[in-house]
Amino acid sequence: MPHPHKKAISDMDASSLIGIIEESKMTYVRENLSIFLHESQIKLLKRVKKHEKPHHKKVRIREYEKAEKDDLFNMHLGLYLNKYKKLEKNGLIEIDLNPDNGLAYDCSLTSKGTEILDEISDLEKEWEETVSICEEDREVLKRLALDSFEISYKHKKKKGFIF
């Protein structure tokens, strides 16, 4: 008799299936990572790497200059900094509260942070092998990602997403 979840999964819609796949990958990474990180911390660490790229930094600086610095903005700034401070406490990033680039703060990866990101990348590749993602599957996933990317990109752009 097949496992009852197999029947439930075979009847799920695409959105639920994507969620199961993402949760599986993240669980695999977290269970095999050499340090304990929450899912949100892994995503934030990846964001720091992205924001170190010159193009992304320029965009953040430009959007920060245009943003209204009201109380709500400052509240969000504090919330974001608290999340980054947890990564800093683990020695994964450094926070510069007075960068000379015009931002309210800036973050950079430490060598330990870079090592952990490399480990995460290796674990994600191991997960792909574990769940047997073939080239055909990868092409389908690429097409889906490209087709769906615009939704989140337009939202972030509309909201002036600068953090």
Image (cartoon, helix red, strand yellow):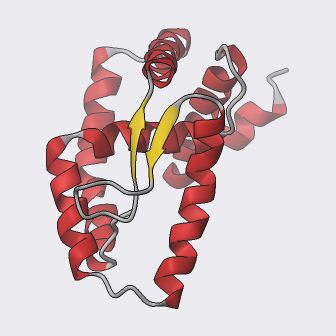
Name the residue at 67% across, 25% down. 30
- The one nearer the camera, 112 or 131, is 112
Residue 93 seen in the figure: yes
Q: Quadrant of residue 33?
A: top right
Quadrant location, the C terminus: bottom left
Give percent across and percent down for residue 38: 69, 38
42 sits left or right of 63 in the view: right
| Vertical comparison of 73 with 117: above or below | below
Q: Nearer the viewer, residue 49 or 109?
A: 109
Of residues 152 and 51, the one nearer the viewer is 51
Left of 54 or right of it: where is 110? right
Instruction: Identify the residue at image location x=35%, y=25%.
Output: 137
Residue 98, horizontal then vertical, whole percent: 38, 57
Q: Where residue 160 sits in the image (x, y, percent)?
A: 30, 75
| Apparent side of residue 152 relative to residue 154 in the rendered image (left or right) | right
Q: Quadrant of residue 125?
A: top left
Task: Name the residue: 16% across, 56% down.
Answer: 58
Could you tell whether 87 is left or right of 110 in the image?
A: right
Total marks in image: 0
Up-down relation of residue 86 to residue 137 (above or below): below
116 and 43: which one is in front?
Answer: 116
Residue 11 is at least partly visible in this image: no
Please name the residue shown 48% across and 9% down the image: 129
Task: Tell me the quadrant of the picture where the N terminus can be found.
Answer: top right
Q: Estimate the x, y position of residue 123 in percent, counting from the top left.
A: 53, 14
